Image: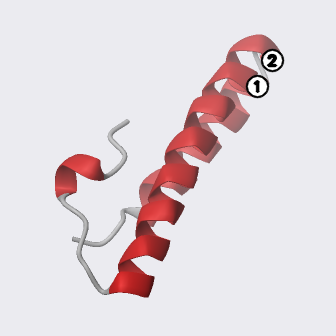
Amino acid sequence: MPIPWGDHLDLARCVALIGEEDLGEATTLLGRCLFHLQRDLVLESWEESTHHPVHQSQRAEV
């Protein structure tokens, strides 16, 4: 199953909007978003290099 890259973009937009109100909360949420993005990029890289699909349970769930 492909990574829902659009979800990462939606998260970034939400963080930007929150940042207009509360910079501390936006910073925390951005860190969480980057963690999930990094994990999905590693999984995507693994799939590409090994041609082994990654199970859905290993995908980012936000």
Quadrant housing residue 49 = bottom left
Residue 23, above or below 6 = above
Q: Is residue 12 left or right of residue 19?
A: left
Per the image, the residue denoted by label 1 is: 19
Residue 3 point in image, percent of width and height: 36, 66
Residue 41 point in image, percent of width and height: 52, 63
Q: Amino acid at mark 2?
A: Leu
Q: Is residue 6 left or right of residue 21?
A: left
Identify which residue, 60 or 22, lies in the foreground.
60
The colour scheme of the drawn protein is secondary structure
Q: Amino acid at mark 1?
A: Gly
Q: Which mark is residue 36?
A: none
Q: Is residue 14 left or right of residue 40?
A: right
**CA separation, marks 2 and 1?**
5 Å
Name which residue lies at 75% across and 24% down. 27
In the rendered image, the residue lying farthest to the front is 50
Residue 32 point in image, percent of width and height: 57, 31
Name which residue lies at 77% across and 13% down. 24
Look at the numbered disc 1 and give the secondary structure of its residue.
helix
Name which residue lies at 43% across and 53% down. 7
Per the image, the residue denoted by label 2 is: 23
Residue 48, above or below 8 = below
Q: Residues within 10 Å of mark 2 (few under 14, many from 20)?
A: some
Quadrant housing residue 52 = bottom left
Residue 12, above or below 4 = above
Tell me the quarter of the image containing the N terminus: bottom left
Look at the numbered disc 2 and give the secondary structure of its residue.
helix
Q: Residues within 10 Å of mark 1 (few under 14, many from 20)?
A: some
Quadrant housing residue 55 = bottom left
Q: Are marks 2 and 1 in contact (CB under 8 Å)?
A: yes
Name which residue lies at 50% across and 62% down. 42
